[in-house]
Image: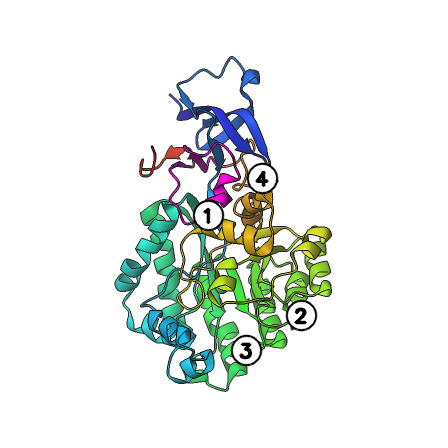
Amino acid sequence: MANQTLLVNALTIDATGTEQNHQALFIREGKITWRGHQDDLPYEISTERFDCRGALVTPGLIDCHTHLVYAGSRANEYRKRLNGMSYQVIAQQGGGILSSVEQLRLASEEELFTQSLPRIQSMVAQGVTTVEIKSGYGLNLKNELKMLAVAKRLGECTGIRVVKTFLGAHAVPEEFLNRAADYVDYLCSEMLPAIDEAKAADVVDVFSESIGFSLSQTEQIFQCARALDLPIKCHAEQLSNIGASALAASYGALSCDHLEHLDDAGIKAMAEAGTVAVLLPGAFYFLNETKKPPIERMRAAGVGMAIATDCNPGSSPTTSLPLMMSMACRFFSLTIPEAIAGVTTQAARALGLQQTIGTLDVGMHADIVCWSSIFDSADLCYQFGNRLPHKTMIAGQWQTDRNFN
Ligand SMILES: [Zn+2]
């Protein structure tokens, strides 16, 4: 007997995030093999039915930008910031990203796994079935590999899909202080080839910024990634516009992320290359930013927009993708369908996985969430900070019945 499930009476969404009523989905051997109006269900499909009772059914949510593997906490920095201390002074006192690097290097792989596990579990409990996890707090081969090994293990342990991204170019480590060019040389000649050799990462990312890696250093890393046939992503135009998104798009980047300061040249380049804009409203909120990404101009140019948590200890310590959807609507004026597509269709594109996940189309992996108490898709964004009851299926297998009423 083949492994199969039939969902009926579902309120589904299409690839643009638009609602469709009275839908049925037939799942066989881990894939969606039929989908349509339930009145059109072929008679050959006769199996036990799972009645969704008109509730919302979406693809499994995809968190396409996280730094969830980290050690320790920077809550004390948050306290200082609330008391009026500037980031610069905090960094001078040993805070900031390099404090995360220090804590990560001190932590064993086991400690790192134990500390990161509740974060990924929290995501799973909110309907996430695929998560991207970046390295970037190790900043040397041994510790970057440690982070990526933990990322892999988290996927094996929770059963969700994990995309591993090498972000060695997150910051310049202390031992290369004022020698960023030497660090980039080390990254390209030693770290990245070894990481590729170990098949430890699926994607390469760069923090390209006036306070991060320069445009020419960014390009050096992109060239290295291209030589190894690894796809790229870029943290671009968060604090200023240095043209990183146009550069990344010219290298066929899967996504450019943040983009608060994105200009028209960047928008045009991203539209032409099909590069996805990943919006990170959690960091925008937490850093109390006021400059918003150019949503209307990206929309007009046809740039796909994804939404992610950016889960990290310094600027977005959250695990709630549904909360990010609500923030993207409120802060960045996304529509409800855009927000839903932003964590499904577009998030899949941002990971280069649009052929296998992110929609409920026939042939896709059956990564599905049944939201048992939601009968209007707007509810997914309208409610914020609430745990929404649901039942999750990954590759055709129902996951533990937690949260399902
Ligand atoms: Zn990030």
Residue bearing mark 3: 211
How far apart are the alpha carbons under marks 1 and 4?
14 Å
Left or right for 379, reference 224: left
2 shown above or below 147: above
User: Within 10 Å of the Cα at label 4, are there few (<14), some (14-19), or many (20+) other Cα atoms?
Assistant: many
Label 2 to label 1: alpha-carbon separation: 31 Å
Q: Is residue 1 in view?
A: yes
Q: Which quarter of the figure is the C terminus placed in?
A: top left
Mark 2 to mark 3 CA distance (whole Å) = 14 Å
Work out which quarter of the rendered image holds the N terminus and state it. Answer: top left
Q: Earlier in the sequence, mark 2 or mark 4?
A: 4
Contact between marks 2 and 4 (CB within 8 A): the answer is no
Report the span colored magenta. Answer: 365-393
Identify the amino acid type marked 1. Pro
Q: Quadrant of residue 134?
A: bottom left
Q: Which residue is mark 1?
A: 322
Give coordinates of residue 269: x percent, y percent.
Answer: 71, 60
Residue 201 in the figure: left or right of residue 115 = right
Q: In the picture, residue 253 is in which quadrant?
A: bottom right
Identify the residue under disc 2.
243
Color encoding of the figure: rainbow
Magenta run includes residue 383 = yes
Circles 1 and 4 in contact, beta carbons < 8 Å:
no
Asked whether 395 or 290 is in front, the reply is 290
Callout 4: SS: loop
Q: Quadrant of residue 296?
A: bottom right
For the point 48% across and 33% down, the residue is 57
Instruction: Give me the C-alpha separation between circle 4 and circle 3.
Output: 36 Å
